[in-house]
């Protein structure tokens, strides 16, 4: 379940960068989630670190104004 959440967050981030939305971000998120599941605990740690970094960056940007 956590892998699906991480995959969704990765896909959403890719869609935001692309700007057009659609299937591309969902497909890349699905691939990322599958890869993280195959890596086991290391993949979970890597995915969690990626999400934590994104949250930290967004929070830091919002405090700047």
Image (cartoon, rainbow, N blue to C red):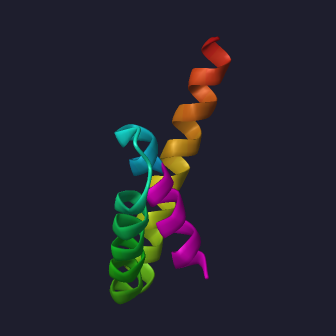
Query: Residue 54 placed where, x, y %?
Result: 50, 44
Relative to residue 60, is residue 64 depicted above or below? above
Front residue (pair 36, 23): 23
Query: Residue 39 placed where, x, y %?
Result: 34, 84
Q: Relative to residue 48, is residue 65 drawn left or right?
A: right
Numbered circles on residues, count: 0
Front residue (pair 28, 57): 28
Residue at 52% x, 65% y is 8
Q: Relative to residue 31, is residue 62 drawn left or right?
A: right
Relative to residue 13, is residue 3 depicted above or below? below
Per the rendered image, the range of residues in magenta is 1-12
Relative to residue 30, is residue 48 depicted above or below? above
Front residue (pair 19, 41): 19
Quadrant in which residue 60 is drawn: top right
19 in magenta: no
Task: Name the dominant secondary structure of the magenta segment.
Answer: helix
Residue at 52% x, 77% y is 3
Quadrant in which residue 11 is drawn: bottom left
Query: Residue 42 placed where, x, y %?
Result: 38, 77
Dividing the image into 4 quarters, which one contains the C terminus? top right
Residue at 40% x, 43% y is 20
Relative to residue 41, is residue 21 depicted above or below? above
Quadrant in which residue 24 is drawn: bottom left
Dividing the image into 4 quarters, which one contains the N terminus? bottom right
Residue at 58% x, 43% y is 55
Query: Residue 36 placed where, x, y %?
Result: 38, 78
- Which residue lies most toward the top here? 65
């Amino acid at each position: 379940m956590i892998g699906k959440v991480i995959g969704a967050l990765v896909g959403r981030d890719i869609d935001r960068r692309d700007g057009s939305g659609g299937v591309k971000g969902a497909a890349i998120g699905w691939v990322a989630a599958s890869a993280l599941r195959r890596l086991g605990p290391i993949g979970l740690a890597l995915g969690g670190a990626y999400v934590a970094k994104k949250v930290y960056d967004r929070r830091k940007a919002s405090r700047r104004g």
